[in-house]
Amino acid sequence: MCSYNTTDVNNLDFKQNDKSSTDDHLMNAVCLRDGDFEQRLIALGCAEVVLPCGVVDNLEALDAHSAHYVLSIENDRIQLAPRDKSMGNPVVVDFSSGTIGFRGRQNVRQELLVKAVLGRDKKTTPKVLDMTGGLGRDSFILACAGCAVTTLERNPLVFLLLSDGLYRAAMDVELQLIVQKIDLQFSDAVVASDAGNYDVVYMDPMFPERTKSALVKKEMRVFRDVVGEDTDVNQLFEQARNVAGKKVIVKRPRKSAFIKDKKPTYSVEGRSSRFDVYQV
């Protein structure tokens, strides 16, 4: 059984809980909800999920559908795949291999995010709220560093991808103890109400591209096409400040403006991004 939290998932109304569920972005996708996919939803505790996109139950109907992206289960993994092969590989959450698996096996204390979260305190590991779960990479890195992480994700398609990744990771003996530290919840962080229960609140919102010529990773292009942008970033930031017990951390492109033009207490900078730390 999965070690992450799936309590009451079957009772959630995904259409009502996800603010972007009626957005045209989600109509770019279609789900092949065949027998294998249905069985995985049952295993995840998500059998009653109503996906806010097209749904078909066979390949013939899938071929006739006009959506640009397909959500399906392939090679025992839920994936979101672009039909245009030039868009790159399917988006899959996999904590055991690739870049994220490699990073998790290294000295995570050298990760910029971990440095921002832990600060100068090397002895204690804070309780962290990740308000923008996405594909779970940041939550996983923080869990590798020993933090207890509550991860929120409000988009149903992304939630399923992340749920499936954690489900498979929980079956890996090398990852079980790590993913036990991650409490995944389907929730809109803007209305999160656990004020003071978290030492650190972290957010990595998906901002609009600055220029039309900006190069975006193919994986991010898929997300922009299907999920769209986070248009309520300011509200998210204010909610983060209300919830955080000690500090709020915001990930930003290195040369971009501060969120709401509010100067942070300090920043931890890398080559392409930075982590702005706001003491509360």
Image (spheres, rainbow, N blue to C red):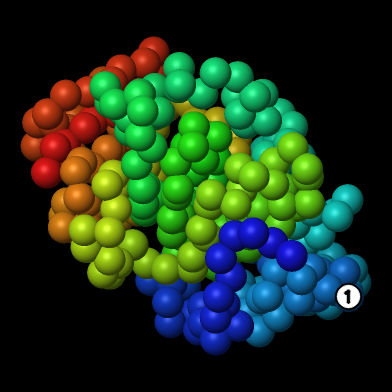
Query: What residue is at 60 percent from the left and 39 percent from the top?
Result: 219
Left or right: 198 with respect to 52?
A: left
Q: Which residue is mark 1?
A: 35
- Quick one: which residue is furthest to the front in this view? 123
- Residue 226 position, x and y percent, is 55, 56
Near-viewer residue (260 or 162) = 162
Q: Is residue 101 above or below residue 41?
A: above
Res 69 visible: no
The foreground one among 248 and 172 is 172
**223 left or right of 98 in image:** left
Q: Residue at x 45, y 49 (%)?
A: 149
Q: Quadrant of residue 20?
A: bottom left
Residue lying at 27% horizontally and 47% vertically, measured from the top left: 199
Pinpoint residue 64: horizontal percent, then vertical percent: 81, 70
Tell me: residue 184, above or below residue 49.
above
Is any part of residue 189 visible from this angle? yes
**Could you tell me how many numbered marks the image carries?**
1
The C terminus lies in which quarter of the figure?
A: top left
**Dot 1 crowding, Cα within 10 Å, few <14, some 14–19, many 20+:** few
Pick whichever, 83 or 252, lies toward us.
252
Q: Secondary structure at mark 1?
A: helix
Q: Could you say where residue 38 lies in the image, as x and y percent from the top left?
A: 80, 75
Quarter of the N terminus within the rendering: bottom right
Is 30 drawn above or below residue 42 in the view shown?
above
Q: Horizontal placement of 232 versus 102: left or right?
A: left
Q: Amino acid at mark 1?
A: Gly
Please tell me which residue is depicted at 45% across the width and 64% down the height of the picture: 154
User: What percent of the width, then of the height, locates residue 276?
Assistant: 23, 30
- On screen, 270 above or below 201? above
